[in-house]
Image: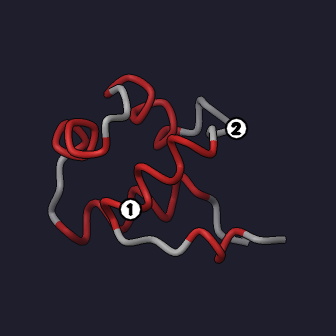
């Protein structure tokens, strides 16, 4: 199963977007985004997941179990 942190990091790097830029464009706090990508935050709020997914064009349905 895909992990949100891995999909976000891979898509962000593929698009050449820095963490700082993603945080700024999505409205998600930089430290929060950093912790999500590093796996420190295990549960991402729906609000933050949607904000990040919208910027990176990620379909959140891939995470359905």
Pointer 1 or 2: first along the chain = 2
Residue at 41 percent across and 52 percent down: it is: 52
Q: Nearer the viewer, mark 1 or mark 2?
A: 1
Residue at 52 percent across and 75 percent down: it is: 59
Report whether 41 appears left or right of 9.
Answer: right
Whole-number angstrom distance, CA of label 1 to CA of label 2: 18 Å
Residue at 51 percent across and 59 percent down: it is: 6
Point out residue 41 in the picture as x, y percentages from the top left corner.
Answer: 61, 31
Residue count near mark 2 (Cα–Cα under 10 Å), binned few <14, some 14–19, many ≥20: few
Point out residue 18 in the picture as x, y percentages from the top left corner.
Answer: 18, 47
SS for tag 1?
Answer: helix
Disc on res. 54: 1
Point out residue 35 in the picture as x, y percentages from the top left corner.
Answer: 48, 30
SS for tag 2?
Answer: loop
Which of the 4 image quadrants contains residue 15? bottom left
Which of the 4 image quadrants contains residue 44? top right
Report whether 6 appears left or right of 22.
Answer: right
- Closer to the camera in the image, 2 or 54: 54
Q: Which quarter of the image is occupied by the C terminus?
A: bottom right
Q: Which quarter of the image is occupied by the N terminus?
A: bottom right
Which of the 4 image quadrants contains residue 21? top left
Q: Residue furthest right?
A: 65
Residue at 31 percent across and 28 percent down: it is: 30
Point out residue 4 in the picture as x, y percentages from the top left corner.
Answer: 58, 57
Disc on res. 43: 2
In the displayed structure, would residue 32 be above or below residue 16?
above
- Closer to the camera in the image, 32 or 24: 24
Residue count near mark 1 (Cα–Cα under 10 Å), binned few <14, some 14–19, many ≥20: some
């Amino acid at each position: 199963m895909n992990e949100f942190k891995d999909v976000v990091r891979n898509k962000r790097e593929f698009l050449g977007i820095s963490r700082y830029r993603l945080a700024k464009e999505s409205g998600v706090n930089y430290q929060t985004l950093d912790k999500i990508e590093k796996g420190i935050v295990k549960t991402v709020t729906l609000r933050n997941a949607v904000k990040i997914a919208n910027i990176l064009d990620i379909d959140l349905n891939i995470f359905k179990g």
